[in-house]
Image (spheres, grey):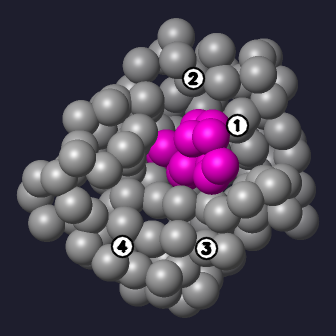
Amino acid sequence: MTEIRRARPDDHGRAVELLDAAMLEVDADRVRDRIDRGGVLVAEADGRVVGVCVLADRGAATEIAQIAVHRSRRARGIGRRLVEAAATETNGPLTATFRRQVRPFYESLGFEIAPATEGADDGGDGGGDDAVGDDDPPTDGRCRGVLR
C-alpha cells in the first residue's frame, strides 16, 4: 500500500534523487527549504519514498513546482494521488506548468489546460526540466493547467 504524506527532513535525499532520476533540474537547498515549510508531499511504499511532489505558494494559488514517481512505480496512480493530496491542501486553485508530453496526465485529473504564455509566473514545471523555483517564464510551447 502507498501512503501519501508530508515529507520529513529525513526524506530530503530520496526526494532529490527521485527528481534527479526524472531528469528534472533540482536545487537541493530549495527542496530542503520547502520540506521545512511543509510544501513537499511524498508517496511511501514498502518503507521507501517512491514519489515526490514539490509545491510552491503563488499567493492565491499553489503551484506544482515539480513532481516525480520512481520509474518502477509509474502507471500505478501514485502521481494522481500526489496531485489529489496537493489539491486537498490548497485554499485556492492548484496550478502546474508542464511539457506537452504530460498534458494527458493533467487533463485526466481535471486541469483546465491552456498554452503557457511568456510572462506567466510559473515557478517550475510540474513535470519538466526547470529548477525548482525557477522564475523564468516558459517559452517553449509548454502548457499551463489550473485545477479549481
State whether residue 4 appears in this view: yes
Amino acid bearing label 4:
Val
Q: Residue at x 52, y 28 (%)?
A: 16
Q: Which residue is mark 3?
A: 147
Q: Which residue is mark 1?
A: 40
**Residue segment shown in magenta:** 56-66
Q: Residue at x 21, y 61 (%)?
A: 117
Q: Residue at x 62, y 29 (%)?
A: 14
Give the crowd class for mark 1: few <14, some 14-19, many >=20 residues within 10 Å.
Answer: many
Of the numbered discs 2 and 1, the one sitting upstream in the chain is 2
Amino acid bearing label 2:
Val
Q: CA distance from mark 1 to mark 4?
A: 20 Å
- How far from the left and from the top, in percent, is residue 85? 80, 61
Q: Which residue is mark 4?
A: 102
Q: CA distance from mark 1 to mark 3?
A: 18 Å
Of the numbered discs 1 and 4, the one sitting upstream in the chain is 1
Foreground pick, 139 / 82: 139
Q: CA distance from mark 2 to mark 4?
A: 22 Å
Q: Which mark is residue 81?
A: none
- Front disc: 3 or 4: 3
Q: Residue at x 32, y 78 (%)?
A: 114
Q: Answer yes or no: do the residues labelled 3 and 4 have beta carbons within 8 Å?
A: no
